[in-house]
Amino acid sequence: MSIIIWTIQLALVPAVSPLCIGVVRKIKARFQNRVGAGIFQPYRDLWKLFHKDEVISEDASWIFKCAPYLIFSTTVIIGASIPLFTTIFSINVLGDLLVVIYLIALGTFFLALAGMDVGSAFGGFGSSREMTVAALTEGGLMFSILVPAFSAHSTNLFAISGAVASFSFFAFAPMILALAAFIIAMLAETGRFPFDNPATHLELTMIHEAMVLEYSGKRLALIEWAAANKFFIFLALGANLFFPWGMSSSERLGDVPLALILFFAKILAFSVFVAVLESTIVKFRFFRLPDLLFTSFILSIIAMSLTI
Amino acid sequence: MFNTLISSNIFFLSLLLWIAGAVGALVLSKNDRLANWWGNSFAILGSCVGLLFSLSVLIIGSTFSFNIDSTLPLLSLSFSVDKLSAFFIFLISLIALLASIYALGYVKHYYKKYNIGALGFFYNIFLAGMVMVVSAHNALFFLIVWEIMSLASYFLVIYENKEKENVQAGSLYFIMTHVGTAFITLAFLLLYRSTGSLDFGVIKETIGNSSPLIADTVFILALIGFGTKAGIIPFHIWLPNAHPAAPSHVSALMSGVMIKTGIYMFIRMFMDMLPDAPLWWGVVILILGAISSLFGVLYALTEHDIKRLLAYHSIENIGIILLGLGSSLVFWSLDMKPLAVLSLVAALFHTLNHAIFKALLFLGAGSVISQTHTRNMEEYGGLIKYMPQTALFFLAGSMAISALPPLNGFFSEWMTFQSLFSGIMASNVPVRWVFILAAGSLAFTGGLAAMCFVKAFGVTFLARPRSENVRHARESGFALRVGMAVLAALTLVIGFTAGSITNAVSGVVSDLSAFNSSEPAFFSTIQTVGMRNGFASISMPLILASLIVTMALTFFAVYLVSRNRKTKIGRTWDCGTTLGPRMEITATGFSNSIVTIFRGALKPTKQTSIEYRDEDMRYFQKSSTVELGIQDIYNRYFYQPVHMLTIKASEYMKRIQSGNINMYVLYILAILIALLFASGM
């Protein structure tokens, strides 16, 4: 039975992440009084990109060519090793908090290198900005998840989910602070407002899009898919570390559909939240971003001092 | 007994080989080729023997001590090798072996320019000096070999003496290292006063009877003295100048292992010789570690001299090692031995890892410099196409130092994090806050280090060449590549065999008398390392395997889907202008945003000077230059005032220097009488 659960766990993130992006785009379009593309449009985009010819810069080295595969692989591995709809994989040693954070860093590292590899003015600046934001996010991200981790006495993400679900009401006060810190870090890591605008190719504002400007065809598809995976991963972490109710904790197959439905409901709620946030606030100036990131770090430290 | 005899003989054999290499190189210095081969071959032989010896001690446990009393009082040639010493001898021999192989090829570009024999001489003496430092067992003997190591490295720093700045860097190093030695000497004198012996073993047994004040004073003196060698902030100012000045294989040794002799003596003195440490020792070391790691990486980000950048990263990594060491001392004083073992294992593991990847990075930088003849990163670019193998090795080093899985740097940083997390959970306010801030600084350090190495690797190896120098670059020679390849392979191998190596390192720690009865707070098998209380666990082989498998599957699947698609080679999008090297991002530009964000701490300076065609009518510029830099706050607020004070004091002292010989005789007489009175009372 657990083989089926394993398969779902492995394939869920890459399978559903484009849909999640589609939903966010649809909501944003409605906010802008547009009809917007269907929520399955990201799948069609991927399919189209995989079947297109590719142009690669003559300056590109093997780093540029291999990076998409590596970046996509890290998101798939992380997707398989975080709690999604079940907490039964707490023996999964890849689910360690630090492993997940540093695997994300591995992907970011190669994405930034790929951005510099083609030697265009955009790519280099995108890499510089991306690494600046990523370096300053790491503290807030790690510490916001450490808050529930210390309460749960484990840094294994499955174990944290399991423990948080049984918290008393009063233990939740610091969790709200930690959640705020986590959301700031999440928006920074996934390149969303107010950090980055995922919908624009305007030179002055872009971070993530600037790095991937030279990609096309199958490699662009992989990069886009990986970005969708990363977004989904952060939504899942937010949903399952801070609102872990309704996850199945047994290997019985009968629990799975209900757990999946609840999981999708939580993801949908988070997607709506992100879409509303993106539609109602503006992008910050780049040098205002560190204030926000340090706020995230300080918030999690306050939360931590309240929990232990 | 038999084992002991053999291993002590092997130990002296390695020293003998190095000395033979030193003397032989000097004798053969007429012939560059021969001197190079002689000096480095004996260095290689000596290192191999040293490796064999240290492994025999680590595996069989054949520790030994050896003592010859000399005719001088207090001085005895006394060696004692326990597992801790053997661990450091292993490090020194390993890095020395690969650096010497590298040097066989690297030294060639000094032929006819500099004296190769002298290089071989000081290089071998330096190696022998380091090994004797970590095995000396008598304070006076220790000071002598410490001085041999320092002087040999000083001469290696000023080896390229045709460049004036190298000589200046050497002088700074000379002064700082002797200031450090002065503090060390004071520490040993104080120990002698309270124990009546200079033998480390006797000091250890009798120091417990003296007052805690003595131990505290010795702690502070040793912290400053050995901290100067280790390069912890604020005693680091010699390091970013001296390490770049030396030949690259020597930089690798200085950065990779010489500064670790400071760490070795920290462990030897604070955890072995001195009595139980009070809490504040560990707290002080934790704070120093946090400051060194965070500021080390921030200063590294501002650099565009590739070797200075790497030198600042040594300060950062020493900081990370101190985080482990400091938490170990804290746990020890709180009587939590299992956690103390964990932290010390983390510190030693990071010492091993840093030695490997830092040596690798310095060797990589050396090959780049030997081809491009500049240390300025702004003149590199696109080297991955000219030196593909060097690029690959440098990438491995960059990933390892940025603590990215699956390489070795990640694992020791993970362990350091675990000891800090345990500290947060196990200790009380206010020590908990120190741990929280230490963990926070480590988290930021990790991110900033990754950023710094995206810059270092990206600007050096990626995109298009930024200067003509690059276009003449060729892949470096065979000997150079062998040295780097082995180190690069080690970053990966140590990564996935982390479990077994943790076991070996914890064997070293439990050999220390303070820890020999305590069960560590972690378990380690070949597959998994984790905390016994179930707080965290990690499997390095699994990370590697899953990365390989997923990448292979992705590659295969993408190939299946889009195998009929063509790939065209085109030009990078150029916005309609000509693509030039000036369109690429520079090293300075890359880190400019982070420098701006941390301007409060880094104090960046910007000087614009514009020359006009017509001074009265300032419309048309002839030329304009912008100079960006950062103020060295330590220089400005600490070293400059001290310097001014010394000069001022000297001015006053000058007044009694009349130059009249009768006057000086009078001084001597006055002092003599005063001394007689003083001793009479």
Image: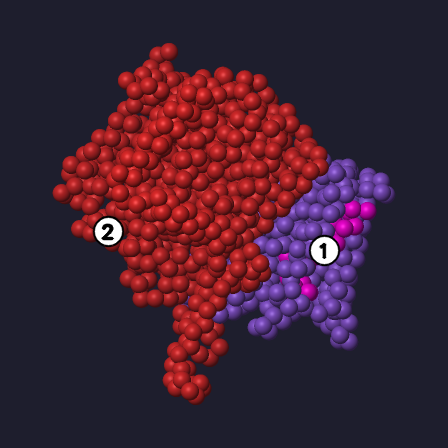
Q: Which residue is mark 1?
A: A183
Q: Quadrant of the C terminus of chain B?
A: top left
Identify the secondary structure beneath mark 2.
Answer: helix
Side of B105 where A210 appears, left or right? right
Closest to the camera, between mark 1 and mark 2, is 2
Which residue occupies the foreground of this view, A45 or A246?
A246
Q: Nearer the viewer, residue B428 or B656?
A: B656
Camera-nearest residue between B310 and B480: B310
Q: Main secondary structure of the magenta part?
A: helix
Locate residue B206, reporting x and y percent.
50, 17
- Horizontal side of B435 relative to B385 (left or right) equals right
Q: Which mark is residue B109?
A: 2
| Magenta residue check for A187 | yes
In the rendered structure, the residue with mark 2 lies on which chain?
Answer: B
Q: In this view, which residue lies farthest toward the right? A: A169
Q: Which residues are magenta?
A: A173-197
In the rendered structure, the residue with mark 1 lies on which chain? A
Q: Which chain is purple?
A: A
User: Per the image, is A182 magenta?
Assistant: yes
- Location of residue B581 by image quarter: bottom left
Instruction: Write down the colour of chain B.
Output: red
